[in-house]
Image: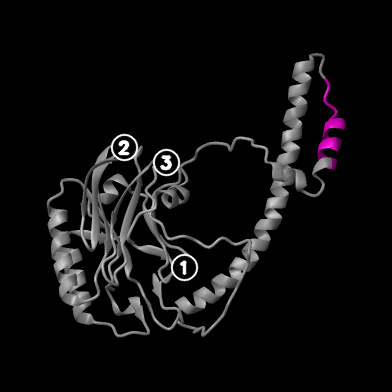
Amino acid sequence: MTKVDLWILRQLWGNTHFDFASSSARGLSGGIISVRNNKVFIRANITCNDNYIVVDGFWAPGNVNIRWINIYAPQDLPSKLALWSSLSDLINSWDGITVLMGDFNEVRDACERYGSVFSDRQANFFNKFINEASLIDIPLGGYNFTWTDKWGSKMSKLDHFLAFENFFEYFPHSKGIVLEKGIPDHRPILLKESQVDYGPTPFRFFHSWLELEGFHDLVTHTWNNDGIAHTNGLVLFKKKLQNLKKAIRELVGSKKSESYALKKEHQKRLSTVDEKIDSGLETIIYQVHHFSFIKGPISFFRMMG
């Protein structure tokens, strides 16, 4: 990453209510970017390094100070040891919640690596750092590995969410999930708390519905045969619209279910292949799947309230 394109960030984020920090690529190492909702997380300070971005601030929904550290660790051991030491200092110097996330380029146990040599020595250094810093490795559901080479012959769990021990006092229902890989070699990881119920979805009419098979017949039949009667014309009109809205919802819901079922059928075929690779049961030399209606996932860190 040499330059941050604000237009791309707006497209990925979905609106302009965000703030970001970035660390440019150096040599063969990729850059790092952290993006956050500036109405939910009030930034106080940013520190950038070749291997991490530190964002300190106030998390409004939980009324707590949080230090987010987005990490892209080096591969050689001396550089890793220097990074573990630097991160320990950052954790000890912060009076609040600390969350580390990203690509640590290291595994904790032999079961987290497949198809490549496991270094017990490097894993011990990593585990020592985690234990001495009083960090909790938040369990990740979903897939076993977060990184896969293009052939599916080598896999590792390199990405983690590490949180200071007081994290669950404020976010007791948090859980980590490894998402489907898609095109990149890393699978995205998601740290999620409880799901927020925003209430019923408001009714919106989309022009594309006019092209649905049977839409015009449905509107005509529903409007002319609803059996609704009322002496007040405005009340009658309102009730007929409410009934029509219900009928349209049912039709659109039915069409969406059909489309979703077809999409899930093809996604299941892709996931089956991905699961076999993840479990080490199959190595794919070359296989191409193209479904124009399936959007490829984008690896992107987003902090939401």
Q: Which residue is mark 3?
A: 16
The amino acid on which the numbered mark 1 sits, given as a three-letter code, is Lys
Disc 1 crowd rating (10 Å Cα; few below 14, some 14-19, many 20+) is: many
Q: Main secondary structure of the magenta part?
A: helix
> Residue shown at 71%/56% (left/top)?
258
**Contact, mark 3 vs mark 1 (Cβ under 8 Å):** no
Q: Position of residue 122 (x, y in %)?
A: 20, 77
Quadrant of res 149? bottom left
Q: Say which amino acid is labelled 2.
A: Ala
Secondary element at tag 2: loop
Per the rendering, the mark at residue 149 is none
Q: Can you tell which quarter of the image residue 44 is in?
A: top left
Q: What separation in Å lies between label 3 and label 1 (alpha carbons)? A: 27 Å
Question: In this orientation, which residue lies closer to the viewer: 179 or 77?
Answer: 77
Q: Position of residue 166 (x, y in %)?
A: 23, 50
Residue at image position (16%, 55%) is 91
Residue shown at the point (34%, 75%) measured from the top left: 112
41 relative position to 287: left or right: left
State left or right for residue 116 relative to residue 218: left
**Residue 66 visible in the current orientation:** no
Q: Which mark is residue 181?
A: 1
Residue 55 picture location, percent across and down? 25, 49
Q: Residue at x 62, y 63 (%)?
A: 264
Q: Quadrant of residue 37?
A: top left
- Tell me which label, 1 or 2, sits earlier in the chain: 2
Q: Is residue 244 above or below residue 78?
A: above
Front of the two marks 3 and 2? 3
How far apart marks 3 and 2 lie (CA) works out to: 19 Å
Depth order, front residue of 148/211: 211
The magenta span reads: 217-229
Give how far apart the Cα atoms at labels 1 and 2 are.
32 Å
